[in-house]
Image (tube, rainbow, N blue to C red):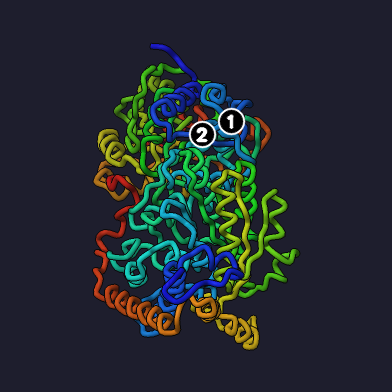
Amino acid sequence: MRELTYAQAIQEALAQAMDADPAVFLMGEDIGVYGGAFQVTGDLVHRYGEERVMDAPISELGQAGVAVGAALAGCKPVLEFQFSDFATLAMEQIVNQAAKLRYMLGGKVNVPLVMRFPAGSGTGAAAQHSQSLDAWLAHVPGLKVVQPSTPADVKGMLLAAIDDPDPVMVFEHKLLYKMKGEVPEEPYRIPIGKAHVARKGRDVTVVATSIMVHKSLEAAETLAAEGIDVEVIDLRTLRPIDTATIIGSVKKTSRMACVYEGVKTLGIGAEISARIAESEAFDYLDAPILRLGGAESPIPYNPELEKAAVPQAPGIVEGLRNLVRGRL
Amino acid sequence: MNAVGKIKPNARPFYQKYSAGQLKEALRKMYLIRRFEEGAEEAYMRGLIHGTMHLSIGQEGSAVGATMALRNSDYITSTHRGHGHCIGKGADPKLMFAEFFGKEEGYCRGRGGSMHIADVATGNLGANGIVGGGLPIAVGAALAIKKQKRDDVAMCFFGDGASNEGAFHEALNMAAVWKLPVVFVCENNKYGMSVPTERSMAVANVADRASAYGMPGVIADGNSIADVEEAIDEAIARARRGDGPTLVECKTYRTRGHSRSDRNRYRTREEIEEWKARDPIPHFEAELMAHGLATEAEVNAIRNSAEAEIAAGIEFARLGTDPNPAEVTRDVYSNEAA
């Protein structure tokens, strides 16, 4: 099968969505002739025109509200934030309006919008351009939050997000944009709310998100050589969480670790751990649950510090080894 | 010209534009708003409803004047003080009362309450509990109108306080730069809760801010339905022509406090009385009668019919269906499985 980068897969999904439905349009900062800060929209403006690939003023709150209003009035906006950190400027519209309008109005409206958030560290952009705020938004009922980890997933999940009648927040790790993978050419959907078993294993379940799926798979290969068989679940969706897949896996392996880039405390790992503790899988656990998350600090600039601020494969190997060998 | 008599040729355009029947309907809406809010206040005092509410008593001239020329397919976004805008746009007071009472029959099935009344069927995209929250939403609705090649408009109500929010700046700038069909209607009632505009803005008028966005800024007497309607009429025409947005500032006053918690410590009795003397309803009645467009008997009949409708609405709401607590998460998502 033909290969695309993660960024190309997004662009293809956006183009196919615009081909299929005239109500779909893109808005964001420098997504026109510039092609987007990460070249995701690329030349789409030349193919679809400035009315469907709209450069907006640097007004994140305003853009988010415009997306809400356009969605209420029959459009399907796809809003690109230049960096996920800038969601902080738009939280009012995301949290108070997009998420709540359907509920507050008694279910009489839909807010079919998509917001795309380039997220994560590893680019040397320091504390205000490197955060992972996915768990913030996943805390809000009314939003759906996805974190696709592969080119094939991002295309299918983005198309599913654009189809969805409710607001969907798509977190894209910036280091994944250049990752290549097989991507079917035709439009297809990957359901929101379904986790994916990225690697089957017997000894320990790793629930990972976004780029941590790849770091966990790398760690799993290292551990395989030591006779430790790691199952890696790509969570894919933070809200709604596919609890059933995780419970099923933990009942099989009797051990669980959560690996995620967002700050460890009160992050997605806390929620998944709690769900296991509350479920029948709790009785199957042979070891404490392990959380490997981001450091309790902003993302620093210095490259070595930056690496130290989020889980890396060697740390994941060590953590899982200790978990399985009973050294926790 | 009408049942009562001929309108004088020197009457202002508002009285020439509408038929006597339309003008009397406008008066009826003003009464419906006034009695709706008085009824809501009374129901609150009697313990029939809980929560808070923000009354617009004294501001009915701007609510009805602004919405009079709107079509069903035009949109409005409204504010926490939005009952008048709702009724102006055509909402049914009994369904609004049902919402106040938290009933399934209410506009939001009892999930929204006073601050979130919406009526999508009449183009009302909703009141909003966040100051300035509706501003960019109205711009988005106007963007959709433009994309769909319609000649409708989006009317955005907000207060003087909202004009100090960042959302105001972002929304007006985007509407202007994209030449969108938005009519920004600022109801300046002199206070952002307790703080007077003199202490929260360094310009005299909210309308003065329009020039920063390259759009017209117009001031209307918010207590004169005629003055408001004429200013809005021009703004709507400009929007429908594709010439872009206008900022209309309606100078008005709320004679009640900000909300239930208000103890009126920030303004004088004299000031309140001065504005009560400028009540938009008797002002409009006097003009209608002076122009021979309505008789005193007709005005009394309109007042009585509004009162009867409000009383029936409260009764309807009282007898409504309470939501089932087991359905607390219903309608968070379109697909309930989420």
**Residue B264 left/right relative to A280:** right
- In this rendered view, identify the residue nearer to me: B94 or A215: B94
Chain-order first, disc 2 or disc 1: 2
Q: Position of residue B331 (x, y in %)?
A: 32, 53
Q: Is residue B322 visible?
A: yes
- In this rendered view, identify the residue nearer to me: A33 or B146: B146
- Which residue is pictured at 53% across the width and 40% down the height? A132
The reply to whether the C-beta atoms of the residues labelled 2 and 1 are less than 8 Å apart is yes
- Which residue is pictured at 42% across the width and 37% down the height? A146
Q: Quadrant of the N terminus of chain A?
A: top left
- Which residue is pictured at 70% across the width and 57% down the height? B209
Q: CA distance from mark 2 to mark 1?
A: 8 Å
As displayed, is residue A316 above or below residue A272? above
Q: Secondary structure at mark 2?
A: strand
Check the residue under mark 1 and report the chain it is in: A
Number of residues whose C-alpha sits closer than 10 Å to that of mark 1, classed few (under 14), some (14–19) or many (20 or more)? many
Q: How many marks?
A: 2
**Residue B101 left/right relative to B284:** left
Q: Quadrant of the C terminus of chain A?
A: top left
As displayed, is residue A170 above or below residue A201? below
Number of residues whose C-alpha sits closer than 10 Å to that of mark 2, classed few (under 14), some (14–19) or many (20 or more)? many
Residue lying at the far top in this picture: please name it: A1
Check the residue under mark 2 and report the chain it is in: A
Q: Secondary structure at mark 1?
A: loop
Q: Position of residue A285 (x, y in %)?
A: 30, 41
Q: Position of residue A229 (x, y in %)?
A: 34, 25
Return the residue at label 2.
Answer: A26
Q: Quadrant of residue B11?
A: bottom right
- Which residue is pictured at 63% across the width and 63% down the height? B249
The disc at residue A31 is 1
Amino acid type, label 1: Ile
Q: Is residue A310 visible?
A: no
